Amino acid sequence: MLYAVIPAGGAGTRLWPLSRASHPKFLHALTGTSASLIQATVGRLGGLTSPDTTMVVTGASHAADVARQLPDLPAENVLVEPLPRDSCAAIGLAAAVIAEREPEAVMGAFPADHLITDVQAFQACVLAGVSGALAGKLMTIGITPTRPETGYGYLRCTSDEGQVREVAEFVEKPDKERAAAYLQSGEYLWNAGMFIWRVDAFLAELARQQPELHDGLRRIAAAWHGPRRDDRMAEIWPDLKKISIDYAVMEGAAAQGLVGTVPGEFGWNDVGDFHTLGDILPGDEQGNVVLAADDAKGEVVLRDSEGVIVVPRSGRLIAAVGLRDAVIVDTEDALLVCPRDRAQEVKAIVDGLKERGATDLL
């Protein structure tokens, strides 16, 4: 039995002003279909897990939307964080809660905001990862690089035992020169942030490297199905260490030879910015992509334009003439216009709004 854990957090700041803190990207339909990213994540796990063994870890402000979008998920399987404590606390809480039910269960963690086009190939990688997890490894799913990408972290691999490789180290985002060298060497995979392990193996490693975090999560999980859950969360959660799972556990585990990975080629994308959306979603003959909501009332008129991404959300007409490789995102309270090759810089706008205290726009 595979327990699927879906961390659903973050504001998706590079997709502002579409993605907001109150309605982040995983709740939006950015898949080329009517399904939101989190709905697509649950959908591609069909056959590997069930609603009863699927959990979502999300913030208090998103829990109602998650429950509405995933009506088959039992209410107790939505694990609500009172405030964000980064990925180790989120995934670790789910592991500890699962361990209360089934101490040697296998769980997989799959972020809510990824896009995957080849579901069959993805499921095959997950099953290979389960095999490695049953043998005691902390498994990841690595993505076979297709280009010298500087926006992703990497996994450096050593031995190749069939489908499973040993991970020697986790590598930070490289510059262009190092990314090109990684691609040429064949020893590196992109770190997609997907993990599979037996919960007892993960919790043992968490206890070794982060004993206070481990103890706090186990205390919360012990009260999860009882009347003291809220009190225990309020008492412990705010003081838990805020740290990513890579830094907290996986880097140290890799140094001990405990981490394995399965290389994947299944059309993966982390939908990081609007330029990426333009690459992965279908467009017209000129490469223009219009990302309209099902209930959108606005109209888009493009003349002599190529490679333009338009996200109409205000209900008014958007017209453009002679544009090349541009992004236009029109919402009720904010309009974004930028070149596609600078789409990652949208995050700087969000940072500036935070500094100004413009919380109503975030």
Image (cartoon, helix red, strand yellow):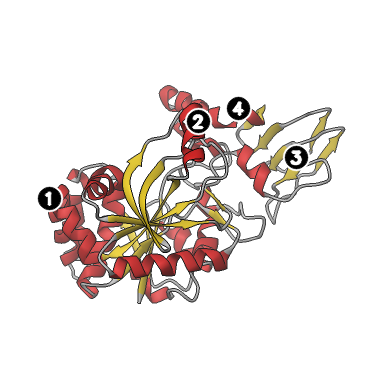
Identify the residue position indicated by label 1 in the image: 211
Q: CA distance from mark 4 to mark 3?
A: 25 Å
Image position, residue 207 (x, y; %): 14, 54
Q: Residues within 10 Å of mark 2 (few under 14, many from 20)?
A: some
Q: Element type at marker 1?
A: helix
In front of the other: label 2 or label 3? Answer: 2
Quadrant in which the N terminus appears: bottom left
Where is 142 relative to 299, above or below?
below
The residue type indicated by label 3 comes to Arg
Q: Residues within 10 Å of mark 1 (few under 14, many from 20)?
A: some
Q: Nearer the viewer, residue 234 or 285?
A: 285
Residue at (12%, 49%) from the top-left corner? 212
Image position, residue 128 (x, y; %): 41, 67
Image position, residue 360 (x, y; %): 48, 34
Q: CA distance from mark 2 to mark 3?
A: 25 Å
Q: CA distance from mark 2 to mark 4?
A: 10 Å
The residue type indicated by label 4 comes to Arg
Is tag 2's residue or tag 4's residue first in the polypeptide sequence? 4
Q: Quadrant of residue 196?
A: bottom left
- Residue 316: assigned label: 3
Describe residue 224's horizontal placement relative to residue 52 as left or right: left
Identify the residue position indicated by label 2 in the image: 347
Identify the residue position indicated by label 4 in the image: 342
Q: Quadrant of residue 134?
A: bottom left
The residue type indicated by label 1 comes to Pro
Q: Residues within 10 Å of mark 4 (few under 14, many from 20)?
A: few
Is tag 2's residue or tag 3's residue first in the polypeptide sequence? 3
In front of the other: label 1 or label 2? Answer: 1
